[in-house]
Image (tube, rainbow, N blue to C red):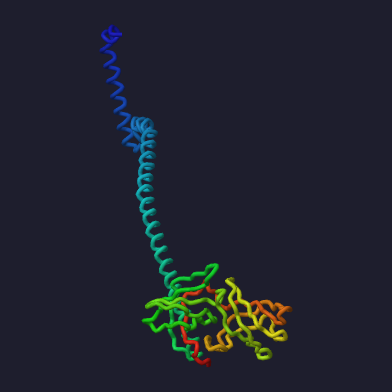
Amino acid sequence: MRNLWRDNRFRIIVVLAVLALFVGIQHNRAMQRGAANPFAEAVMALVAPVQSALRSTGDFLSDFGYGVVHGRRLREQNQRLQREIEALRAAQTALEEVQQENDRLRRLLQFAQSRKIRPLVARVLAIQPSAYFHTLIVNRGQVEGVRPRMVAVTDRGLVGLVYLVTRHTAHVLLITDPNASVGARIQRAESRAVGVCRGRGEDYLVLTFLSKDADVRPGDVVITSGLGGVYPAGIPIGTVEQVLEQRQAGMREARVKPFVNVMQIEEVLLTRGETPPS
């Protein structure tokens, strides 16, 4: 090979020089005609795939970086919006609770005004229904003027009777307590039958001591009779659900559903038993 180069070196140089001259002439002519450089086209043909791959990789990396940064911002924005939504929900819940409390207090005050009762509203602190006692504790006591034998009511009806008072709390014996009893009357004008409502430790009362011919029917409204001087007359107690015959005693009884659900009480109105009805 060396001998070939050494022996033909002059000829090879001459051929390469001629080729270079020819290429230069062709290049000049092409440039004058505005045609593309054939060598440039060849180089571009070789480089194009690599350039395309590099461009695709660059676009991918750019999109990936944008997605990472933008995705992080979206997550942070979503978390912030979620916190704002939760805060708004909490505020709405608090507002609804205040609205409900205002509605209950307004009804209590209207009830007090309609019966000429001096309003003393107490908030329920605890409800204690057990097998032996059904009581609740309120946040008013001796300092606020609460005394034993005061009656607890809501705008729906009778709740019970205060039996124990401390400086700032009072204990109320609920009408559902087995030890509770209240003079009662059928409100219906054609009846006006009287008896005694007793607690049973359940979610209903029993209207006892009705005469055997007492006109008592399911659906009748039962109110306090005012007899005995403990409870004011006319306070709603509940509705007769069922009338029972007591043949041996020659009397009748009725099962009464109280108007007030003691497990849902939040505020009560306290009043004296001797308060005259309207």
Residue 178 lies, in percent from the top left, at: 57, 74
232 on left or right of 30: right
Residue 62 sits in quarter:
top left
Q: Which residue is drawn at 27% across and 20% down?
A: 17
Could you tell me if residue 99 is visible in this image?
Answer: no
Above or below: residue 263 compared with residue 236: above
The percent coordinates of residue 104 (x first, y second) are 48, 79
Query: Which percent across, then down, holds residue 261?
Result: 55, 74
Of residues 132 and 264, the one nearer the viewer is 132
Q: In this view, does 26 lie to the left or right of 209?
A: left
Image-quadrant location for residue 144: bottom left
What's the residue at 48%, 71% (across, down)? 127
Can the viewer see residue 133 in this picture?
yes
Image quadrant in which the N terminus is located: top left
Residue at image position (36%, 51%) is 72
Query: For the image shown, how many numbered marks are present on the structure?
Result: 0
| Left or right placement of residue 18 versus residue 253 in this view | left
Determine whether 181 is above or below 31 in the image.
below
Q: Give the farthest residue toward the top.
A: 3
Closest to the observer: 16 or 107? 107
- In the displayed image of the protein, which residue is found farthest to the right? 247
Q: In this view, does 194 lie above or below 52?
A: below
Q: Is 60 drawn above or below residue 4 in the view shown?
A: below
Between 246 and 160, the residue placed more toward the observer is 246
Residue projecting furthest to the front:
248
Q: Position of residue 160 (x, y in %)?
A: 52, 79
